[in-house]
Amino acid sequence: MKRVLLCGGAGYIGSHMAKMLAGHGHAVTVLDNLSTGHRSAVQWGTFIEADLLDVAALDNVFGAARFDAVMHFSAYSLVDESVRQPYRYYENNVGGALNLLQAMQRHGVGRLVFSSTASVYGNPAAALIDEDHAKAPINPYGMSKLIVERMLADAAAAYGLRSVALRYFNAAGASEAAEIGEAHQPETHLIPNVLKAVLGQVPGLKVFGADYPTADGTCVRDYVHVEDLAQAHALALDYMERHDGAHAFNLGSGQGFSVREVIAAVEQVTGRQVPYEMAPRRAGDPAVLVASNERAKRELGWQPKYNDLRSIIESAWRWHSDPKF
Ligand code: UDP
């Protein structure tokens, strides 16, 4: 049994993490400022409403309970918004992480699993991106995450912090029981927006860019199920028992799908037409992002269970056709 603090545990990926850790018998504490998370998504563990920018609140949290490890999911994560509001991203994502790391150090907590992103790579120079690919973010969101990764490497060398940064590709899907799922306000992500378009909850999907250098002109992404992401975090906790230093792993399925292919898959799963129109490119979007996930498989022992787009969309559809919050 480990005592784990989940920063951002009321959010999409964090809430699935809380469920999995509680299911494995770990003691979970969720810390969240509820800026984008949902109180009703916190169904496992203890809840503390606090902000990572509030240093005194962090000292209270770490002073009141002992934690074996921290998982850090709290961040702003919209590429387009980060291009328009970079200070907000650096303050929250870099400043918040620094406060957290310093609080962990003051209170003797030496293990961190960090939510990183494929956006640290920028425009890929290879069809499959592995962890050694050049890090050249093309938007402030990706840069904010890369800076934190760098802080983790520096903290490993200077203070012996053990960490695992998990570079997510495109998180999708919902818990098997569909009691929690993806609910961003406003929703900007592709799969929820396609499903909302099918359900008539938005006027129609806008496809951002049909002139990319891809087979059908639309962006290609690697969709990975949220429960598979959570599984990798659980494995990262064990990994830090065996390995010191700062480590990073890609979490993706290894397969890329275009926006048009996602639309077609949603039409197959739901049996309904997707109303959509072409729109200009969105700022900060690379044409293609697909993971090599070999390192996570080899070193963490990660085996994604959802290995086809259809089952990921079926899972998202179960949630979106009956969302609980
Ligand atoms: N996208 C789109 N319409 C939408 C939302 C997204 O065409 O309403 C495209 C977006 O431009 C990108 C892909 O779908 O190429 C995935 O975007 P998403 O926001 O889901 O994830 P990101 O790759 O930005 O993390």
Image (cartoon, rainbow, N blue to C red):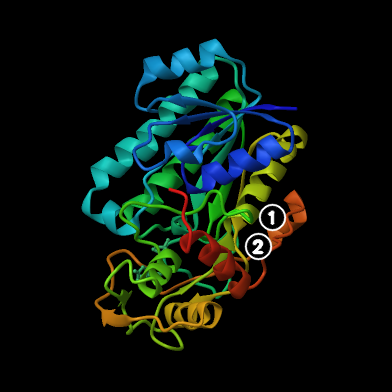
Is residue 224 shown above or below 70?
below
Question: Which mark is on residue 296?
Answer: 1
Horizontal arrangement in the rendering, residue 296 relative to residue 278 (left or right): right
Q: Residue furthest left?
A: 84
Residue position for label 2 = 293
Residue 31 lies, with reference to residue 12, above or below; the image says above
Mark 2 element type: loop
Residue 201 percent across, percent down from the top left: 33, 66
Secondary element at image label 1:
helix
**Residue 108 drawn at (x, y percent):** 59, 16
Residue 286 visible in the picture: no
Q: Nearer the viewer, residue 199 or 59?
A: 199
Q: Crowding near pointer 2: few (<14 within 10 Å), some, many (20+)?
A: many
Residue 108 image label: none
Residue 95: image quadrant is top left
How far apart are the two marked residues, 1 and 2, measured between alpha carbons?
A: 6 Å
Is the CB–ligand 1 distance for label 1 below 8 Å? no
Residue type at the position of mark 2: Asn
Location of residue 42 with respect to 283 vertically, above or below: above
Q: Is residue 52 visible?
A: yes
Q: Examine the image and state in which quarter residue 178 appears.
A: bottom right
Residue at screen point 64% across, 56% down: 176
Number of callouts: 2
Give the left or right position of residue 284, taking residue 321 as reference: left
**Please, what is the three-letter code of the amino acid marked with disc 1?**
Ala
Question: Which residue lies at the image location 49% right of the left edge and 41% below the top edge?
Answer: 41
Q: Position of residue 209 (x, y in %)?
A: 31, 78
Q: Which of these two is toward me, 137 or 278?
A: 278
Residue 27: % across, % down: 66, 27
Q: Nearer the viewer, residue 148 or 319?
A: 319
Q: Is residue 139 left or right of 294 when viewed as pictured?
A: left
